[in-house]
């Protein structure tokens, strides 16, 4: 499957798996099996556009592992989506679910499209046809999609409705990240950003950093993950001095008024033009002086070209794969503390798991219960990562991977190979 190797993200994820396998002396047969996804589905999605023409989009769903349970992973709408990128993200999901102790495997989906150029009706038709093409591969017992870049609660509602129409009854458990009215969970939309900041709190304790206004935070990306991470950091009493979206970065040395930035963004759908801050480029934002950097937009933004200029002491990966393999080496050599994506941004999949459980039981929890259970799991994951890092003398990313691969590997060995 050479096609899988096309993206940097897949190559980097594979390098990480290989290094982890070596460090933990992983069974070579398990290593071989983990290198490739269990199943990769490619679909073409014909969509009637508003001008009556028909456009055909490329869609993917990759299921990396079903060993621990049904697959779980987001659906991304972005013009750079490729089978290789989706496969890398699916592999990362296997390890993220495993580290968090969830009874779920890893998957990811995507459509190669610039969703911001679609009308609401076009996006709905695309989503419904994509769902229909995938309907025999997804379901509460098989594979449960969720939102990712370019998709949201409304997109999940359309998936849930299409799948349910085809079955003839409501199946809320087919997706997570849905609106509350149709079986969504309280706290899901902010859970990834909230989880990022729970791990930042633990890392501050570990590094003995006081948690007050003197701690400066910069967040790249102001979507579902970035905006909620910035809000939680602000609520924790840290000073958020920089944020960005795809259009520009904003910087205010004295701290941004996050509520005012959110209001501005909601009204203008862009950070551009916000007056109470200096406008800077996304690239410059990453290398500004700060204590904690949260890249929460896209992958590969910290790499061999800019890693040496990163001034933050701590990098909490809100996005998936925001630091390349080469960039990571430089950061580690420079003594930076990294909270890797499979730990830092696991809050989304953990509350997705809660949503799935609530849907299956038709019994819904309070937001307080959800946040407190989320905190317990995130804190435990952080502890496992630190203990593994100290005991095995490996960096934090490898430590998280060792713990994650260990659980999947044990399950694979217990289940054995079919047929023998
Ligand atoms: P989103 O679409 O809600 O937001 C993405 C943000 O990034 C937007 O503010 C956008 O303007 C910005 N952005 C896009 N391209 C950019 C670029 N080239 N440079 C700078 N900024 C850019 O997406 P999201 O759900 O917040 O996801 C962000 C990242 O977090 C992705 O890597 C995703 O895989 C990961 N993630 C998301 C979740 C979740 O629950 N949504 C969970 C785990 C991981």
Image (cartoon, rainbow, N blue to C red):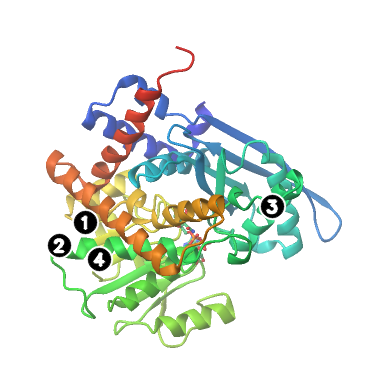
Which quarter of the figure has residue 277?
A: bottom left
Q: Identify the residue at image location x=76%, y=49%.
A: 165
Q: Which residue is more in the foreground, 404 or 142?
A: 142
Q: Say if 31 sits above or below 263 in the image.
A: above
**Sooner in the amino-acid sequence: mark 2 or mark 4:** 4
**Sooner in the amino-acid sequence: mark 2 or mark 1:** 2
Instruction: Work out how far the residue at label 2 is from the one at label 1, CA to CA, in angstroms.
Output: 9 Å
- Where disc 2 sits, the SS reads helix
Left or right of residue 82, residue 306 in this image: left
Ligand 1 lies under 8 Å from the Cβ of mark 2: no
Disc 2 + disc 4, Cβ < 8 Å: no
Instruction: Work out how far the residue at label 3 is from the one at label 2, CA to CA, in angstroms.
Output: 48 Å
Instruction: Work out how far the residue at label 1 is from the one at label 3, CA to CA, in angstroms.
Output: 45 Å
Residue count near mark 2 (Cα–Cα under 10 Å), binned few <14, some 14–19, many ≥20? few
Q: Which residue is more in the foreground, 188 or 332?
A: 188
Q: Which residue is more in the foreground, 353 or 385?
A: 353
Q: Identify the residue at image location x=36%, y=74%.
A: 242
Q: Position of residue 111 (x, y in %)?
A: 62, 48
Q: Position of residue 69 (x, y in %)?
A: 47, 37
Left or right of residue 287, residue 34 in this image: right
Disc 2 + disc 1, Cβ < 8 Å: yes
- Where disc 3 sits, the SS reads loop
Q: Nearer the viewer, mark 2 or mark 1?
A: 2
Read off the residue under disc 4: 201
Read off the residue under disc 3: 170
Q: Nearer the viewer, mark 1 or mark 3?
A: 3
Read off the residue under disc 1: 337
Read off the residue under disc 2: 207
Identify the image quadrant of the C terminus.
top left
**Sooner in the amino-acid sequence: mark 3 or mark 4:** 3
Left or right of residue 388, residue 13 in this image: right
Instruction: Work out how far the residue at label 3 is from the one at label 4, CA to CA, in angstroms.
Output: 40 Å
């Amino acid at each position: 499957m050479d096609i899988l190797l096309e993206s940097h993200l897949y190559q980097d994820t594979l390098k990480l798996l290989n290094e982890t396998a070596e460090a933990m002396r992983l069974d070579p047969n398990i290593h071989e099996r983990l290198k490739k996804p269990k199943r990769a589905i490619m679909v073409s999605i014909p969509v009637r556009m508003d001008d009556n023409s028909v456009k055909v989009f490329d869609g993917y769903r990759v299921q990396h592992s079903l060993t621990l349970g049904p697959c779980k992973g987001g659906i991304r709408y972005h013009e750079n989506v490729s089978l290789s990128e989706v496969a890398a993200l699916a592999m990362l999901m296997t390890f993220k679910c495993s580290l968090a102790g969830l009874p779920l495997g890893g998957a990811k989906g995507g459509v190669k499209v610039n969703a911001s150029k679609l009308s609401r009706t076009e996006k709905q038709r695309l989503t419904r046809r994509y769902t229909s093409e995938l309907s025999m591969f997804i379901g509460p017992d098989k594979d449960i999609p969720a939102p990712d870049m370019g998709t949201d609660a409304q997109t999940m509602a359309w998936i849930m409705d299409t799948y349910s129409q085809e079955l003839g009854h409501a199946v809320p458990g087919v997706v997570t990240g849905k609106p509350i009215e149709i079986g969504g969970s309280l706290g899901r939309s902010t859970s990834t950003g909230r989880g990022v900041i729970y791990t930042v709190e633990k890392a501050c304790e570990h590094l003995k950093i006081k948690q007050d206004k003197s701690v400066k935070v910069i967040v790249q990306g102001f979507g579902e993950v970035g905006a909620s991470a910035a809000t939680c950091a602000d609520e924790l009493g840290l000073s958020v001095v920089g944020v960005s979206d795809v259009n520009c970065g904003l910087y205010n040395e004295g701290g941004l008024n996050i509520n005012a930035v959110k209001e501005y963004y909601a009204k203008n759908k862009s950070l551009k033009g916000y007056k109470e801050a200096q406008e800077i480029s996304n690239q410059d934002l990453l290398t500004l002086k700060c204590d904690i950097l949260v890249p929460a937009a896209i992958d590969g933004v910290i790499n061999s070209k800019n890693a040496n200029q990163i001034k933050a002491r701590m990098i909490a990966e809100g996005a998936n794969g925001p630091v390349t393999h080469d960039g990571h080496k430089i950061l580690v050599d420079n003594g930076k503390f990294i909270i890797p994506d499979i730990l830092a941004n696991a809050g989304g999949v953990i509350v997705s798991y809660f949503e799935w459980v609530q849907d299956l039981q038709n019994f819904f929890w309070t937001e307080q219960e959800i946040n407190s259970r989320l905190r317990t799991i995130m804190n435990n994951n952080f502890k496992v990562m630190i203990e593994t890092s100290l005991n095995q003398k490996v960096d934090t990313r490898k430590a998280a991977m060792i713990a994650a691969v260990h659980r999947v590997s044990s399950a694979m060995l217990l289940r054995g190979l079919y047929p023998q």
